[in-house]
Amino acid sequence: MKIVFITGISFFMSLFSWLSPKPEETNIPLCHSGGNDMSAMAADPAFQQLHPAPLPFTYVGAGEMIKFPTPDGQSANAFFLKAKKPSNKWLLVYQEWWGLNDNIKQQAESFYNDLKDVNVLAVDMYDGKVATEPSEAGKLMQSANKERLSSIMKGAISYAGPKAEFASVGWCFGGMLSLQSALLEGKQAKGCVMYYGRPEQDVDKLKTLNTDVLGIFGSQDKGITPESVKTFEENMQKAGKKVTVKMYDAGHGFANPSNPVYNKEATADAYKLSLNYLKDKLKA
């Protein structure tokens, strides 16, 4: 997740277009979406060089991997941290483009420890696959499919149950998914945090949101530009919804320690802001 120029900008626009297939691709099986608009760019070595491999890290802590059914007749995986006391409060955590790796599990545990008495579910959007190299992540991104992603999110929502109250958080690819998750959660949605993910710009869709949104972005981001964030703010206003935007003097992926543009101070401040927001929304 680096500052992206020329082809990189085009890739991000394709990456965060909610993965909409072309009409001629609608018969492609849900597990494979080869040949879509982002395939060539995801495999572009120039783009991959902007995403150095994550630093080696092994998560050792609480939590367990679980499986749950999805509406498409399949099943999905998630890393689950169950509240110590019975609770209908849930935080859905959405991964970066690498997949549900140990860094995301650690971040999920941080929220779990700080929120207290909230179930935390880090959803695996790649069906068990995790990339450790940019070329691998590019291939996984190429095979990501809108319908499958939606089905996984719906399955996670159903797993928590009809009485669950949801908040969501995600970074980059997961930032986009966090907002899409909030749209799918309906009246169960209580909060949404999106870190430098592509905002939904469809006003009619935004009108269906049942929560406000906390958006965390970077003024130096060449993929999710300040201009696109401004448009998002305007569209949320048109939809009659509230969005709070915090713009840091940083680039895309600034909260990822493996990213050369990692900004420790901005990351700490953004986490504090997100935590306070989530505590208020989940009354934790």
Image (cartoon, grey):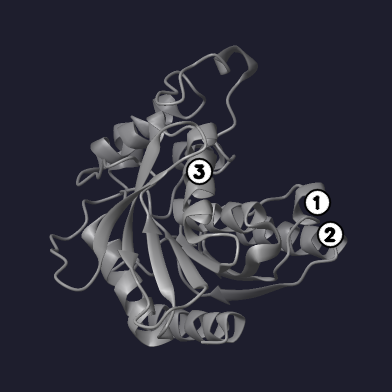
Q: Which residue is mark 2?
A: 239
> Dot 2: within a 10 Å radius of its alpha carbon, few (fewer than 14), some, or many (20 or more) residues?
some
Q: Position of residue 3 (x, y in %)?
A: 42, 55
Secondary element at tag 1 = helix
Name the quadrant containing residue 268: bottom left
Q: In screen coordinates, is 43 left or right of 174?
A: left
Name the quadrant containing residue 188: bottom right
Q: Pointers 2 and 3 in contact (CB under 8 A)?
A: no
> Dot 3: within a 10 Å radius of its alpha carbon, few (fewer than 14), some, or many (20 or more) residues?
many
> Dot 1: within a 10 Å radius of its alpha carbon, few (fewer than 14), some, or many (20 or more) residues?
some
Q: Which residue is found at the position 28% from the left and 65% from the top? A: 105
Q: Nearer the viewer, mark 3 or mark 1?
A: 1
> Mark 2 or 3 closer to N-term?
3
> Mark 3 or 1 closer to N-term?
3
Marking on residue 127: none
Q: CA distance from mark 1 to mark 2?
A: 6 Å
Q: In screen coordinates, is 179 left or right of 242?
A: left
Secondary element at tag 3 = helix
Q: Position of residue 178 (x, y in %)?
A: 54, 58
Q: Pointers 3 and 1 in contact (CB under 8 A)?
A: no
Q: Which residue is mark 1?
A: 203
Which amino acid, by three-letter code, is at mark 1?
Val
